[in-house]
């Protein structure tokens, strides 16, 4: 009888543990769903911002650069995937963008480099040649450290987006980040980050653009 009681108690304990574990997972799923619903609600609210047709018909030039150890790489051909991900989302909400081919054909690399070094004349010159009234700059920054415990490189990725008019006036700023990632492909991780966060980032940029543009 005593042995049977011990077995029953053990079974009840295991069952209770499993139920508690299942309840925990259920809670986590519910939290994830709630967070996703909150994010989508925020995105929809931002995209509901009224936008004049005149503003929507003006061109936006997207430029991507990457900062590594204080040095900025801004060869646009290296960031085709990043460019396409942003352009597609901007166009999906009704905004006009300049193609990467147009940028390559009409803007010198030296001018793009100067723009990323905060040269306002470079920005003005580039936008005039492309008849672009606005510039969206995405800057990838990263910090690399070696984790001795697991023996891998960890890279913290952040992308800062700044939307300005041709004169350099800031209309909007948004950012996305991933706390850490084991690996050295920072541009690849940045592309993953854009695809994960682009809806929120573009919605914020869209709302600010519609409210402050023109």
Image: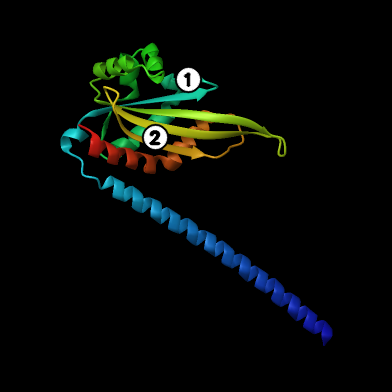
For the point 31% across and 36% down, the residue is: 90
Q: Secondary structure at mark 2?
A: helix
Q: Residue furthest bottom?
A: 1
Quadrant of the image containing the N terminus: bottom right
Where residue 149 sits: x, y (%)? 72, 39
The residue nearer to you, when weighing 192 against 120, is 120
Which of the 4 quarters of the picture holds residue 111?
top left
Q: How is the image coloured?
A: rainbow
Instruction: Provide the secondary structure element on which disc 1 rests.
Output: strand
Q: Which residue is mark 2?
A: 85
Of labels 2 and 1, the one closer to you:
1
State the image quarter where residue 138 is shown: top left
Task: Give me the disc on residue 162.
Answer: none
User: Is the C-beta separation of discs 2 and 1 under 8 Å?
Assistant: no
Label 2 vs label 1: CA separation? 21 Å
- Answer with left or right where residue 18 lies relative to residue 26: right
The one nearer the camera, 72 or 99, is 72
* Rendering coords of residue 143 (x, y %): 57, 30
Please report whichever mark, 2 or 1, sits nearer to the chain's N-terminal start.
Answer: 1
Which residue lies at the image location 51% right of the left edge and 31% below the top edge?
188
- In the rendered image, which residue does mark 1 sit on? 72
Mark 1, Cα crowd under 10 Å, few <14 / some 14-19 / many 20+, is some
Rendered view: 83 above or below 113: below
Residue 182 locus on image (x, y percent): 61, 36
Give coordinates of residue 187: x percent, y percent: 50, 29
User: Which residue is situated farthest in the front direction here?
Assistant: 169
Q: Residues within 10 Å of mark 2 (few under 14, many from 20)?
A: some
Picture residue at 26% right of the left edge, 35% below the top? 95
Q: Quadrant of the C terminus?
A: top left
């Amino acid at each position: 009888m005593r042995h049977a009681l011990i077995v029953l108690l053990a079974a009840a304990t295991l069952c209770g543990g499993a139920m508690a574990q299942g309840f925990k997972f259920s809670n986590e799923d519910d939290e994830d769903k709630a967070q996703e619903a909150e994010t989508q609600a925020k995105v929809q609210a931002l995209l509901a911002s009224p936008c004049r047709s005149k503003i929507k018909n003006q061109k936006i030039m997207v430029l991507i650069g990457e900062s590594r150890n204080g040095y900025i790489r801004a060869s646009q051909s290296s960031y085709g995937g990043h460019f396409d991900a942003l352009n597609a989302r901007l166009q999906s909400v009704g905004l006009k963008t300049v193609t990467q081919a147009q940028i390559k054909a009409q803007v010198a690399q030296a001018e793009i480099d100067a723009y990323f070094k905060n040269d306002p004349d470079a920005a003005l010159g580039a936008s005039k040649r492309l008849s672009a009234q606005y510039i969206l700059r995405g800057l990838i920054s990263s910090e690399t450290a070696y984790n001795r415990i697991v023996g891998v490189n960890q890279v913290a990725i952040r992308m800062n987006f700044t939307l300005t008019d041709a004169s350099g006036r800031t209309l909007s700023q948004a950012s996305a980040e991933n706390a850490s990632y084991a690996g050295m492909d920072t541009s690849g991780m940045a592309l993953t980050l854009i695809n994960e966060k682009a809806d929120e980032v573009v919605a914020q940029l869209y709302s600010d653009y519609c409210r402050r543009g023109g």
